[in-house]
Image (cartoon, rainbow, N blue to C red):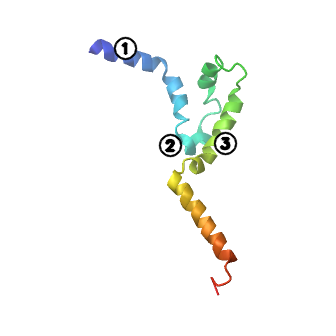
Amino acid sequence: MDRIVNSLESRFTKHQKLFKDFECFHPSSFDSLNELPENFLKKVTEKLETFFPEIQENSLKQQLLDFATKWSRLSQTLSDEYSVVNLELNNSDNDNDPYIGT
């Protein structure tokens, strides 16, 4: 059992910087993205270059920041989305009804 624990600790310790970089992709971290150091995606970018040679750290950062600003809208549930749409439709219908609001 100790050997397994030591092996896991060794693997996680070796890749600690990469795990920290991946943490910024979790929605709970989105609010603090602007507080992170300039090179917070350096390790992730290096790993992604294997699959996407044209990737640039600054571009990845800008895309992540853009996604983070849109997350609250994207993460709405289907029922939340329909509630907003139905409310907008009801308000629109009421605006066209001459008997409502008089």
Which percent across, then down, holds residue 4?
32, 14
Q: In this view, does 88 lie above or below 73?
A: below
Q: Residues within 10 Å of mark 2 (few under 14, many from 20)?
A: few
Residue 16, labelled with which disc? none
Q: Which residue lies furthest to the right in this view?
A: 54
Residue 28, labelled with which disc? 2
What amino acid is found at the position of numbered circle 2 in the picture?
A: Ser
What amino acid is found at the position of numbered circle 1 in the picture?
A: Ser
Q: Is residue 23 left or right of residue 54?
A: left
Residue at 38% across, 19% down = 9
Residue at 67% across, 31% down = 60
What amino acid is found at the position of numbered circle 3 in the picture?
A: Asp
SS for dot 2: helix
Q: In this view, does 13 lie above or below 35?
A: above
Tell which of 83 and 40 is nearer to you. Answer: 83
Residue 66, labelled with which disc? 3
Q: Quadrant of residue 84?
A: bottom right
Task: Answer with mark 2 or mark 3, whichever residue precedes in sequence.
Answer: 2
Which percent across, then down, holds residue 77?
51, 51
Residue picked out by circle 1: 7
SS for dot 1: helix
Whole-Å distance between the Cαs marked 2 and 3?
A: 15 Å
Whole-Å distance between the Cαs marked 2 and 1?
A: 29 Å
Split into 4 quadrants, where in the image is the C terminus? bottom right
Task: Answer with mark 2 or mark 1, whichever residue precedes in sequence.
Answer: 1
Which percent across, then down, holds residue 43?
59, 23
Whole-Å distance between the Cαs marked 3 and 1?
A: 38 Å
